[in-house]
């Protein structure tokens, strides 16, 4: 019985380890997609907290970290303080050849000036990708106290 429980604990521990924790190198696009999905989908936002997942790629380690943190902040700011602007324009001109009608629509997502005080970094890890560094950072921002 003792050996069965040791084996069971070993199996459960091995199964609970996730892909991102084990990886240190990104070998191609399939690795990149798998890591991105695992890291960014692990943290779910709700009414009281918003998570932002960011990634940064650079040949300099510190620049990679800074880029990923900024990207995570932008993703949170997009959720808590952005607005969608849409403008439409329709013109018609008539000539001897007939009516020429043109329609144009422009949609913009504008992130307003947003203060993200008291965010918390809940995950950060850097991987080697070729001769560059890719850092993933996930932040948590409390939206309701």
Image (cartoon, grey):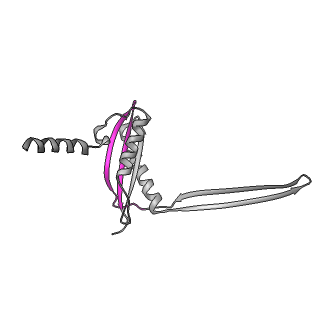
Residue 11 or residue 143, whichever sits in front? 11
Front residue of this view, candidates 122 and 115: 122
Q: Nearer the viewer, residue 6 or 136?
A: 6
Answer with the quarter of the image where residue 26 lies: top left
89 horizontally vs 80: left or right: right
Residue range in magenta is 115-141
Residue 43 location (% of width, % of height): 35, 54
Residue 64 visible in the shown view:
no
- Locate residue 16: give its quadrant: top left
The residue shown at (20%, 41%) is: 11
Residue 99 image position (x, y, % from top left): 85, 56
Give left or right: position of 101 versus 22: right
Most extreme residue toward the left is 2
Q: Is residue 107 visible?
A: yes
Q: Residue 23's quadrant in the figure? A: top left
Question: Residue at 46% across / 60% down in the picture?
Answer: 79
Residue 142 lies in magenta, yes or no?
no
């Amino acid at each position: 019985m003792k050996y069965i429980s040791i084996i069971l604990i070993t199996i459960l521990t091995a199964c609970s380890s996730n892909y991102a924790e084990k990886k240190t190198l990104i070998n191609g696009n399939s690795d990149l997609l798998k890591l991105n999905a695992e890291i960014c989908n692990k943290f779910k936002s709700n009414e009281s907290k918003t998570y932002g997942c960011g990634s940064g790629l650079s040949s300099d380690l510190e620049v990679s970290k800074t880029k990923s943190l900024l990207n995570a902040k932008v993703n949170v700011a997009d959720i808590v303080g952005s607005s969608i602007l849409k403008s439409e324009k329709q013109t018609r001109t008539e000539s001897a050849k007939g009516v020429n009608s043109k329609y144009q629509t422009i949609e913009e997502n504008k992130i307003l000036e947003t203060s993200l005080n008291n965010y918390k970094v809940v995950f950060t890890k850097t991987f080697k990708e070729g001769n560059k560094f890719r850092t993933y950072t996930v932040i948590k921002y409390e939206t309701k106290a």
